[in-house]
Image (cartoon, rainbow, N blue to C red):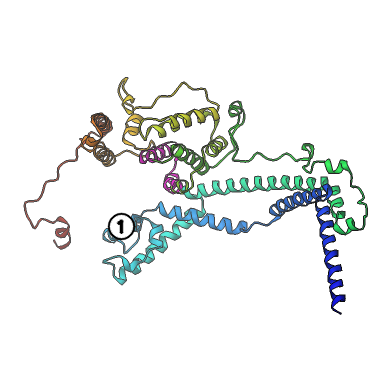
Amino acid sequence: MLNTLLIILGVLAGAALVLILLHFRYSNRPATAWKWRVQTVVAEWDVRKLSLTRPTDISPEVRDLALRGEYFARHLRSISVDHLLNYSGIGPVTVLRLREAGFTDLNELSRGNFPTVPGLGPAREKDLLAALQHAKREAKNQFDAGACPAAVAMLAEKNAQKVERTRQHDAAREDLKEVEAAFSYLAEPIRVAAEITFMHYLARRPVAGLSEKLLARSLTPPPFLRVAKLAPVEVAPAPAIAVAQVPPVDNSPVDRLRAVAGFGYAVAKFDGRIAAGERRQIRVFLERRYASTNDLRLQIDQIAKAIEKDVPGLDRAIAEVRRTIPASALVELHQFAASVVDASGQRNAREEQCLARIAESLGLTLEPSKPVATAQIGNAGSWTEIDCRTMLEIGIETPLNVELIRRQYYLLAERFAPTRFDDHGAEFVAMAATKRAQVERAARQLMAAFNAPLESPATQQPTDLRHNPDLDAVFG
């Protein structure tokens, strides 16, 4: 009995060894290796087809509702709490207490907690809640009628998103046609590969259609079967000749603002870090050239923070501005890049390489650039208002007033106080003194239009310790 069992085990072991050897020979056949390549290629095309036919997670209705909520919140942020003075029961003292508690606009007030505001009793909270409801209702009616910058911007953004979704849908449809063409091309290899099995090999069954010609045939669809694809947004810089010939796509102001902001931060980070001076220069330029409305100006900081968390590469940023910005403004963008580079101090070799790369990608033929020194502004004669605004870091669209000019003057005078640069050497002290003198000159020239002194008039202190006009007005 034992001998019989050993014989059976020996036969099974021998059969298994024979099968292993046969499968090894089967696996090393050119036809088997070709079959596995076919399966790999088909799997890649299947994944691509699945990604193109998968439905989107967010419905258009939900997307539009979220967009409306975002822009209505911006509209509320543009309405100061001072607007509540127009409603009964709300006086200057109530508004002052709201501001002291950190509520400066209707959006913040809508999300706030009134009991946290010191000095507001139940009756005043009731009046405040009623006034806020009336103000929000009026703001909603104004927003729905499209009579505010936020509503106009929302409509532009909605149209831009619709155009982008249409472009993506068309691109996906073209990609799907390409996938279908690829499967048509691979139909014969797929059929033949399905017939190449280990069992057919053991049975010595010939595979219909398998030939040396088929094995040598490329598994990549030939170029004439590929469907032309739409040009993607993020591409490598095109030849210079294409800049003047290809008009940019019609984009919303928010798209242009976001594209230029990304371009500025890409330039600033090209040398490895983003300096505070570079951030200020980017913001001043965005406010002056691409924030023509109050709603856009309110979005600058939000867009800048989002971009700084994920700064695009230089090539990607250049491709985006070429897509959104007219060709006539490309020279100005190169000048903007130079001003960002110079905002952090003297240029290094990497920054020079960055500017040269931008000029080449934008198709610009420029003279070798030199760092822009602020001392060059207006040296040939009197300064223009734009020169003065630039020196004081005041946006071109910002209305001028005496307090604004004084505030910027004192801020920059403190920033460039020569004593703050004593540890950096005599050269930096001299540069700071020059810069401070230029700031003072710009401020005095702007103040001349208001016929007011640059220095704030000294406030005379009352000699009577009981002097308090506010209390006198209340108690008589």
Q: Is residue 97 left or right of residue 65?
A: left
The residue lying at 80 percent from left, 50 percent from top is: 28
Q: Residue furthest front?
A: 3
| 96 drawn magenta | no
Q: Quadrant of residue 126?
A: bottom left
Using the image, determine if residue 37 lies above or below residue 414. below
Which is more toward the observer, 470 or 322?
Answer: 322
Residue 165 position, x and y percent, is: 63, 48
Using the image, determine if residue 290 lies above or below residue 118. above
Callout 1: few (<14), some (14-19), or many (20+) C-alpha neighbours within 10 Å? some
| 295 drawn magenta | yes
Majority secondary structure in the magenta region: helix
Q: Give the magenta part as a residue range.
A: 275-304
The residue to which callout 1 is attached is 99
Which is more toward the observer, 158 or 408?
Answer: 408
Q: Is residue 469 left or right of residue 353?
A: left
Residue 345 seen in render: yes
Q: Quadrant of residue 62?
A: bottom right
In the rendered image, the quadrant that contains the C terminus is bottom left
Q: Is residue 59 left or right of residue 331?
A: right
Q: Residue furthest bottom?
A: 1
Residue 48 position, x and y percent, is: 71, 51
In the rendered image, the quadrant that contains the N terminus is bottom right
Residue 118 position, x and y percent, is: 27, 66
Using the image, determine if residue 72 lies above or below residue 237. below
The residue lying at 41 percent from left, 41 percent from top is: 273
Three-letter amino acid code at the position of disc 1: Arg
Q: Residue furthest left?
A: 463
